[in-house]
Image: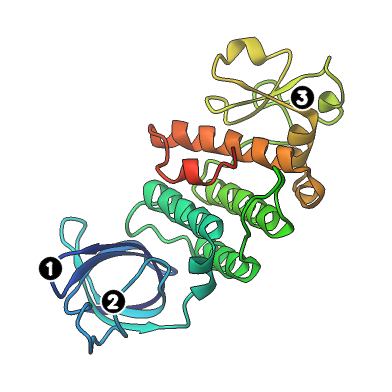
């Protein structure tokens, strides 16, 4: 039985001189792994070699979790070609694919997350983040970091691990005004899955101290647009730490996303 779906390639490996094993994140089926026979041939029926971020309509044979699906058709749409022109933007998108691949189970559909990921790729492709210069982030670089932060939070929400960011994850006290002064310190704890107030922080040795600007931006994401460079960097470092805990290993692409 054949299945039709919309898909984005999140991993591609050479299988032979002419074939590949590819992992797709699909809208209706979820993550699937498939063999693409003959995909590397000059006149491939898949419109050429399949690369990460390739996007379009696919047709594949049903399979079990123990056996690869077989890709029979791939109608590739115009790719995100601009990503290859800028290393930072490309690395942010590769980091997002690594998180998806590590946290999404096969044949577990997440259509809203698929839409979020596709929009993230489109928006990042348009921005073409520029290199860091004079110790500050360019406007394009800032935009991509903000987009990445929002996607990471959307990913956590969709897989049922949405962190608590509007109150202390332990005592449920609102963090509003708590981050306004040094006396009202705010922390992030992966084990608590959210922000932690000063009164509760002693119970969470894995906590990370947050500045008031980072805590406020996490509790009100509209503030990301106006956040300072160092605040965006602090938030991303906190999220990288959190994903490291969730994956039980440091994400390989994280070091290419952090700015210093």
* Residue 120: mark in rendering: none
On screen, residue 116 above or below 196:
below
Q: Nearer the viewer, residue 19 or 258?
A: 258
Residue lying at the far front of the rendered structure: 134
- Whole-angstrom CA distance, mark 1 to mark 3, is 57 Å
| Mark seen at residue 16 | 1
Secondary structure of the residue carrying tag 3 is loop
**Label 2 SS:** loop
**Hey, which quadrant is residue 29 in on the image?**
bottom left
**Identity of the residue drawn at 41% across and 47% down:** 103
Nearer-N-terminus badge (1/3):
1
Q: Position of residue 192 (x, y in %)?
A: 57, 25
Q: Nearer the viewer, mark 3 or mark 2?
A: 2
* Residue underneath mark 3: 173
- Residue 204 lies left or right of residue 171; in this view the side is left
Q: In the picture, which quadrant includes the N terminus?
A: bottom left
Question: Which is more foreground, mark 1 or mark 3?
Answer: 1
- Asked if the residue at tag 2 contacts the one at tag 1, i.e. Cβ–Cβ closer than 8 Å, the answer is no
**Residue at 56% across, 41% down:** 258
Specify whether 18 is left or right of 6: left
How many discs mark residues in the rendered view? 3
**Residue annotated with mark 2:** 49
Q: Nearer the viewer, residue 133 or 88?
A: 133
Dot 1 lies on which element?
loop
Answer above or below: position of 220 versus 29. Answer: above
């Amino acid at each position: 039985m054949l299945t039709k779906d919309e898909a984005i390639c999140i991993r591609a490996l050479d299988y032979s001189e002419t074939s590949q094993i590819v992992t797709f994140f699909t809208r209706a089926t979820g993550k699937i792994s498939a063999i693409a026979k003959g995909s590397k041939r000059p006149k491939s029926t898949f419109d050429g070699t399949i690369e990460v971020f390739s996007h379009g309509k696919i047709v594949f044979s049903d399979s079990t979790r123990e056996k690869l699906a077989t890709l029979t058709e791939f109608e590739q749409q115009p790719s995100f070609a601009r990503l290859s022109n800028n290393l930072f933007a490309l690395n942010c998108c590769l980091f997002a694919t690594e998180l998806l691949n590590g946290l999404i189970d096969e044949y577990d559909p997440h259509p809203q997350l698929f839409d979020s990921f596709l929009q993230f790729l489109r928006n990042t492709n348009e921005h073409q983040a520029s290199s860091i210069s004079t110790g500050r982030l360019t406007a394009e670089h800032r935009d991509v970091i903000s987009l990445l932060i929002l996607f990471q939070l959307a990913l956590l929400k969709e897989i049922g691990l949405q962190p608590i960011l509007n109150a202390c994850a332990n005592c449920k006290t609102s963090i509003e005004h708590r981050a306004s002064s040094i006396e009202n310190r705010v922390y992030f704890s992966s084990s608590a899955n959210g922000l932690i107030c000063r009164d509760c922080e002693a119970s969470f040795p894995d906590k990370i101290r947050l500045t008031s600007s980072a805590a406020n931006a996490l509790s009100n994401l509209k503030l990301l647009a106006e956040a300072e460079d160092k605040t965006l960097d602090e938030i991303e470092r906190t999220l990288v730490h959190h994903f490291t805990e969730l994956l039980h290993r440091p994400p390989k692409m994280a070091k290419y996303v952090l700015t210093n």
